[in-house]
Image (cartoon, rainbow, N blue to C red):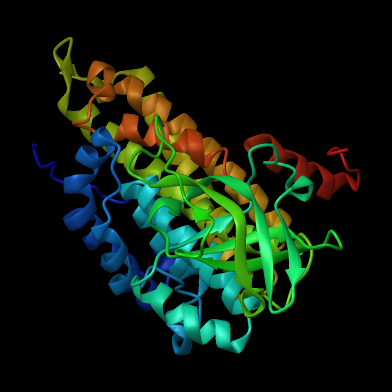
Amino acid sequence: MAVRTDLFQSPDYYQVDGLLTEEQLMIRESVRYYVKKHISPIIEDYAQRAEFPQQIIKELGDLGCFGPTVPTEYGGGSLDYISYGLMMQELERGDSGVRSTASVQGSLVMYPIYAYGSEEQRKKYLPKLGSGEWLGCFGLTEPDHGSNPSGMVTRFTDHGDHVILNGAKMWISNAPFAQVAVVWAKNEQDEIQGLIVERGMPGFTTPTTHGKWSLRASATGELVFDNVKVPKENILPNVKGLKGPLGCLSKARYGIAWGALGAAMDCYDTALRYSKERIQFSKPIAGFQLQQKKLAEMITEITKAQLMVWRLGMLMNEGKATAQQISMAKRNSCEIATQICRDARQMLGGMGITGEYSIMRHMMNLESVITYEGTHDIHLLITGMDITGLNAFK
């Protein structure tokens, strides 16, 4: 296997770095260094083999990428949301699957246990999840219920000191290797509640999803519950209804808004460098108008997205960001990243489809990123409902 040298240089056309604190810049540099040294050299090989690099779980924990906004007393980093966003940007610049692992762990597992859990649950689970000793996953999507999670059929019934859980979830990142699953299910009153399900509970299985063309270096699976006995102390006590899982998704979508931008940056940087080196008709292809048009449009969209996620991060830090604002940023970053990847691939010609460059892997990954945590169209309708006051979902 040829080890690819990571030459990435971050684009910053509007000097957005000047808006960042010294601490935020240091955090970004530490994650960027990690990606260059430990992700870029191996990720193409893992993606080609459709294998998850399990060693990164402990590495990401050591780096502080799991639950960075969770208080340090529970194993998090007590960092601000711009620092969290920068971490996700750098991880997804390496690979969307690596960022997915961190997003799920922090926003979809640690966050609900911290926000909705009991003190006992926080102390039991969060330090192990924060350190990477345990991997977690998030069970919301079902075989027949994706964009409409309120239609879920996974249920639990009361049996004294425990409940019995039945149902199935699919498209679950981290599932095959997770020790803990935060699962959303309906109780006997049809209320949605969260349960912490642990590996080893009889009747709980996590079949791996095979045959993916996207997120190939990420572990995806199902969660199957066949009369799983879950102690009542594993139910998250402080939330009921869809606001529980949707609150988690807002945190994850925020991370994706930064992350997808990282993938866009990587493709732009690759295309820019290649276009200066690739000679056709006796000059670098960067000197041709159509190639400059592509590059100019790429950096324009990246710059607009950088300013959007920075402002969103400031609003998150102030507790003022709305779910609808997060939705817009997630959709925008995914859309521009997808287009930038496609234009970059064209600029590289045939080389763009090979594993020698990251572009085709990013392209395939982004087809998942633009779909999960709310599809492209659903996010459009969230914005539409917010500005008109009219619900187009029903």
Left or right placement of residue 203 versus residue 150 in this view: left
Name the side, left or right, on which 270 lies relative to 379: left
Say which residue appears at 63% left-offset and 84% top-offset: 118
Residue 98 lies, in percent from the top left, at 36, 52
Give the answer, above or below, for where 267 lies relative to 131. Answer: above
Identify the residue shown where x is 27% and y is 56%.
54
Q: Is residue 191 above or below residue 385?
A: below
Q: Residue 163 appears at what percent x and percent y? A: 69, 69
- Above/below status of 26 relative to 74: above
Relative to 3, 371 lies left or right: right
Residue situated furthest left in the rendering: 2
Q: Residue at x 19, y 56 (%)?
A: 38
Residue lying farthest to the top in this orientation: 281
Q: Is residue 392 above or below residue 75?
A: above
Question: Residue 135, located in which quarter of the rendered image?
Answer: bottom left
- Residue at screen point 34% across, 65% down: 28
- Percent x, y of residue 23: 37, 78
